[in-house]
Amino acid sequence: MGVIQSENRPLPMPQPDNANDPAALEVFARKLYRNRTASGFALDIRFAVPPGITILFGSSGAGKTTTLACIAGLVRPDEGRIRLAGRVLFDSGEGTDIDVSRRSVGYVFQDLALFPHLTVERNVRYGLRRIEESEREKRVGEILESFRIASLRSSLPGEISGGERQRVALARALVTRPAVLLLDEPLSALDAATKGRIVDDLRAWNRAQRIPILYVTHSREEVFALGERVLVLERGRVVAEGLPQDVLGAPREETVAQLAGFENIFDARVAAVHEDTGTMTCRLAPGALDLEVPLTRIEPGSIVRVGIRAGDILLATEEPRGLSARNVLRGALTGFEEKDFRVLARVDCGATFCVLLTPGARRSLGLVAGQAVWLIVKTHSCHLLRLAEG
Amino acid sequence: MNWQALGLTLRLSLITAMALIVLALPLAYWVAFSGRRWKFLVQAATSLPLVMPPTVLGFYVLVAFGSSSPLGRLYERWTGHTLAFTFEGLVVGSILYSLPFAVQPLVNSFLAIDRRLIDASRVLGASRLATFFRVILPLSASGIVTAVALTFAHTFGEFGVVLMVGGDIPGVTRTISIDVFDQVQGGNYAAANVTSLVLLAVSFVILAMVYGWNRRAWPRTPWA
């Protein structure tokens, strides 16, 4: 994997506990958008993040992109204060408003915004105008190498693939050595394999540079795959923040739970990889319970996180036979939770699973607490959510 | 064929087109990107020459630069003569008369540029001016070509403003369209026919070149 080295700069020591890092980016911003029809959209956010990847997570229209635009200086808050690495970028009280071009911000737009009339090399070089010639050449050469786009140097953005354009956009932002990196759904249009490789590059780069990276997404899987921390936005406000597993794994907010979607999230270790059957055996941390999950590009022994939606699990009162599903787990019903025509059954199979049932299914099967049941989980209902630093 | 009138008209059209592109670029930038509330007033004023009779426009140019106006006196003090019935007078009148033909295509092509490209340039440290020269201008090539060609062609065939401001002085203000008028007045239909054909051909060639260029102009985002 390509690793971007940070030359001329001491490598900061990796800090395992991000909570102890000084806040590298502090944002407080309020802005009211009036429109003629409804009451309008109001942004009212306040957060501080340390270096490392922080996910801004939320449905569309939650204010994620507007938040990035406020930090970059493309949108001016009505009121607020934005501080980056000890420097005040915006303060409505003091009347400070640093120009966009002087904020040292790296921004990768959702549609990338590569300059269509400039070659890959000149796109990457664009932000280095104020730098001395020899240093500029060196930096451009290095970043093109580490993002494996050096061979595309003289191509136009219209002539290269989507994944390559993504790399060019990242390289163009990173080559300026920004104090913060803002990524607006940068990988949403890519296939899983390309996405994985770019994420690896980004994470390697982040280990070396340790700047705050705000990564906007509405994909749950990206939250678990990337994030050291997650901020959940809803209607212009931060409604939850913390570690991905805390925020989305045991969501207290209903909106977060909806967004997260996975009622069952388990830590597991990859025990065996079966290339012949296209599966991997994952051993769940709490007991000796094994789950067959889809095969992915991952080393045996790696720690992974497995997410299963409660609605994807079948429940049987007798041991089922002749099924294609690879996971048939014996367990005991421990309790029910009933809410609006939905029954959530809890089943202990060595680990506790939540299973979504209809009230009718519960009645016709005559389910009671303490009863022995079997859970059926298809391999492809097990979603592999890779941990941030494996 | 009145070669003198043809040469004079070409010179007038060229100078007008060049002057207009310099004046229209900042004006079009402002119209395209300003958030001012009264922008519509400027847009309306810029478009006035499209609907006003050329005689009215010419009349106002005469009044504005006449010896009774401060502007006219200032001009007279600089040059020693008034603007009326001079080649410079024709240039000023033509610039005003063709202004919308320069501004409109530029505004259209500025507005067609993806705003994100401008944001990206600014975030990457470029000033507004640098962004204009490095991103906006190169991506507006078709608008610039259209603006130059249209103002050139429009001035080439101009009649009313020229007659009002310049009169009909051979070698100074007698343009090709006025030459046609003179020939028809004198019953000289054969000469008028030749001159008209030249005017028609030149105008058609210029417009064909504009449409041909725009057909193979850069797509703005080639992959979208």
Image (cartoon, coloured by chain):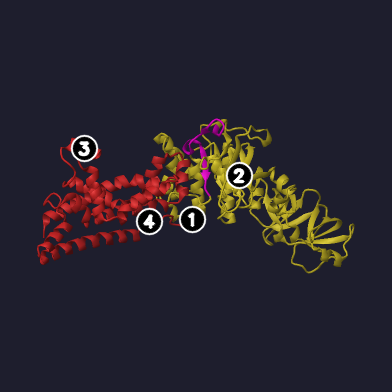
Q: Amino acid at mark 4?
A: Trp
* Whole-number angstrom distance, CA of label 4 to CA of label 3: 48 Å
- Which residue is at a point 58% across and 44% down the rendered structure image? A32
Q: Identify by letter the chain in yellow.
A: A
**Amino acid type assigned to the residue bearing label 3 in the image:** Arg
Shade of chain B as shown in the rendered figure? red
| Residue behind mark 3 | B73
Mark pair 2, 1: CA separation = 36 Å
Quick one: SS at disc 1? loop
In the image, residue B33 sits, relative to residue A14, either above or below, namely below
- Was residue A100 drawn as part of the magenta stretch in this picture? yes
> Which residue is the site of mark 4?
B218
Does B177 sit left or right of A114 as displayed? left
> Which chain does tag 4 point to?
B
Chain ID, mark 2: A
- Residue located beneath label 2 in the image: A43
Q: Quick check: can you spot residue A298?
A: yes
Whether labels 4 and 3 belong to a single chain: the reply is yes
Q: Which residues are magenta?
A: A88-109
Give how far across and how far down residue B170 sits, in percent: 11, 52
Q: Which residue occupies the foreground of this view, A99 or A175?
A: A99
Amino acid marked by disc 2: Leu
Point out the tag, 4 or 3, that comes first from the N-terminus.
Answer: 3
Say which residue label 1 marks: A161
Instruction: Compute the Cα span from label 1 to label 3.
Output: 64 Å
Answer yes or no: do the residues labelled 2 and 3 have beta carbons within 8 Å?
A: no
Name the quadrant of the N terminus of chain B: bottom left
